[in-house]
Amino acid sequence: MEVYTGIDWSENKHDVLFMNEAGAIVTYFVIPHTLDGLRKFDDTRKKLGVTAADCLVGLETAHNIVIDFLWSRNYSQVYVIPPNLAKSCQGRYRQSGAYTDKSAAFLLADLLRTDRQRLQPRHPALPLTQQMRAKISALLYLTRTAVRLSNRLRAVLLRYYPAAVNVFSSLDGVVTLEFVRAYPTPHAAAALGRDEFETFARQHGYIQVKKLPACFARLQAPQPQAAPAVIESYRMEAASLATLLLDTVRTNKATYKELGKLFAQHLDHEIFASLPGTGALLAPGLLVKFGDDRNRFPSPASVQALAGTCPVTKQSGKRKYVQFRKACDRDFRYLSQQWALRSLDVSVWANTYLQRARSRGHSKSHALRCLANRWLAVAWKLWQSRQLYDEEYHLRQQAERRKPK
């Protein structure tokens, strides 16, 4: 006998409902988010005489320790139900829109009972893939954090210390950040001699020695002077921002190295490394988003929908609307569109496709999204067949398809 279990999860407690094949509630209870609470869930299933393999579990997240507990107890049929799907199905039972935690758990269990064929069970990724997923998530967060800190630091320096912005080529470079920390005011920089400046730059890894005289000249060039009160107000913030950004940059660099080592060990690394334009972030990022379970994405359309590169079509009668897809994995969309952009540097086919999309009147962003959509279809085919990308073969295939029949 199979039972259908809905778990309405939260941070502190979980509402659990078991349903039989006829749609009747077998039992309902609430467990705390503790080990004893999760054990109670497993013990209840055992008391019902149901094996873990016959217990279908539905919940609305894959990012909770509950799902790790289920996999550790050999629950092989765990379904992650998209929240927007669950929300759109609430009208099946209550037209008023009212809902409770119990009704949410009931809805998840009933969706498994009635719509199971439209859902894909989620299986645990390989430990190596899980580590890579954590690194990718950290890198995307660190990158956004670095941009935010850099923008704030730039605004602060322009307010009271504009010379520091353009001394070196990059504001988020290590030498620039160390310079702001060591010389946080215009007066401190004005007292700096050329020999001392060049020694400081070399000590902090600046290798473009021939450019140091020009850097020093930019530092000593006349600049508008902020009021002493303004300088005193911002100097500590600038030094703090430089420290935070420096730590972020160094952590980012170290994470990239760790990710590269993990990526090289993965069985599918050659497939994604062969994709044109992918590098230290995009290749492992795409691998992580595709995952290890090749049954999860039965068609390229399922990958494209998750990445948000394909549009949403709404048609009724004579009316038809094609809209931008909002419900998606936004990190996946970012990685896909960045891949499309980077592929233009190395792929003839990508440039040809983009030019055709632009000739149809698409904006550059729209055309890149279309290119990303096509690239994902290519990556899906290679991933399923375990083949490497071959640009020459791809161009020949495209030429064959364009020949008149």
Image (tube, rainbow, N blue to C red):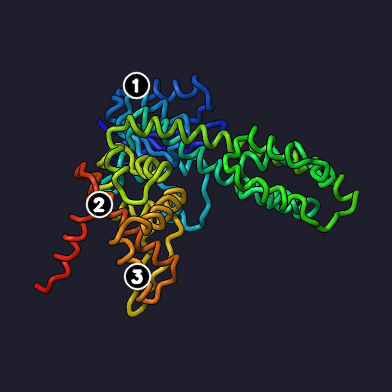
Which residue is rendered at x = 82% and y = 45% of the image?
190
Marks 3 and 1, the one that precedes in the sequence: 1
Instruction: Using residue 22 as the reference point, say whether residue 279 is left or right of it.
Output: right
Marks 3 and 2, the one that precedes in the sequence: 2
**Where is the C terminus found, in terms of image quarters?**
bottom left
Name the mark on residue 299. 2
Q: Classify mark 2: helix, strand or loop.
A: loop
Amino acid at the residue labelled 1: Lys
Front tag of 1 and 2: 2
Indicate the position of residue 33 as horizontal and vertical percent values: 53, 27
Number of residues whose C-alpha sits closer than 10 Å to that of mark 3, classed few (under 14), some (14–19) or many (20 or more): some
Number of residues whose C-alpha sits closer than 10 Å to that of mark 2, classed few (under 14), some (14–19) or many (20 or more): some
Q: Classify mark 1: helix, strand or loop.
A: helix
Indicate the position of residue 34 as horizontal and vertical percent values: 52, 23
Name the mark on residue 46. 1
Query: Do we see residue 148 in this rendering?
Result: no
Indicate the position of residue 60 as horizontal and vertical percent values: 44, 42
- Residue 124 against residue 279 in the figure, above or below: above
Q: Nearer the viewer, residue 359 or 315?
A: 359
Marks 1 and 2, the one that precedes in the sequence: 1
Q: Provide the residue designation for mark 3.
A: 355
